[in-house]
Image (cartoon, helix red, strand yellow):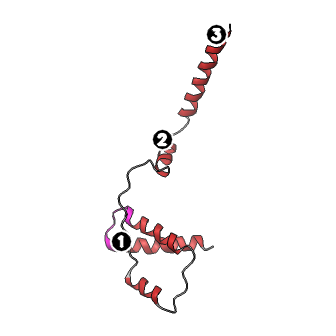
Amino acid sequence: MVAAMKKALVSARILAVCLIAAGCTDNDWNRMLNYGGMGEEAAPVTAVQPPAAEAQAAAAPTAPAEPANADFCRNVAAQDATRNGFDQATQQKVFQRSFAQCVAIYTR
């Protein structure tokens, strides 16, 4: 009788593991792989320089001080601008918009 109970318990454990694994949707797996560092190979990121007008404004002595998270926001904006294969003009617009959004979100 002990062997029969042991066999039933092993079968129940296998069934439970299968049901838990089946509960994960494809989106869950995609999210885990992408944000876990195991997704598609990322294209090499090239640094996007801010437009000349923005660089001149930052160099001016009357320009306001950059927020504490400016480096982080600059990196996020560069990643947003270069990831989708935009042309240079569009990359600059995306960089500016993404940088402004990041600063606005993280300086609240």
Q: Which residue is mark 1?
A: 90
Residue at left 58%, top 70%?
Answer: 105
Say whether disc 2 or disc 3 marks the residue closer to the N-terminus.
3
- Cα–Cα gap, marks 3 and 1: 69 Å
Q: Is residue 49 magenta?
A: no
Reading the image, the residue beneath label 2 is 26
| Coordinates of residue 48 in the picture (x, y in percent) | 38, 72
Residue with the mark numbered 3: 3
Q: Nearer the viewer, residue 106 or 71?
A: 71
- Outermost residue, top direction? 1
Q: Which residues are magenta?
A: 82-90
How much space separates mark 1 and mark 2, taking CA atoms?
Answer: 33 Å
**Residue 99: % across, % down:** 48, 73
Q: Are marks 3 and 1 in contact (CB under 8 Å)?
A: no
Q: Quadrant of the N terminus?
A: top right
28 lies left or right of 1? left
Q: Nearer the viewer, mark 3 or mark 1?
A: 3
Q: Which label's residue is closer to the chain start, 1 or 2?
A: 2
Q: Indicate which disc residue 81 carries.
A: none
* Quadrant of res 49: bottom left
Q: Residues within 10 Å of mark 1 (few under 14, many from 20)?
A: few
Give the amino acid at mark 1: Thr
Provide the secondary structure element on which disc 2 rests: helix
The residue located at (40%, 74%) in the rendering is 93
- The picture quadrant where one finds residue 7 is top right
**What is the residue that sits farthest to the right in this orientation?**
1
Q: Is 83 contained in the magenta span?
A: yes
Element type at mark 3: helix
Q: From what the image shows, is residue 27 above or below residue 11?
A: below
* Amino acid tagged 2: Asp
Residue at 38% x, 70% y: name it. 47
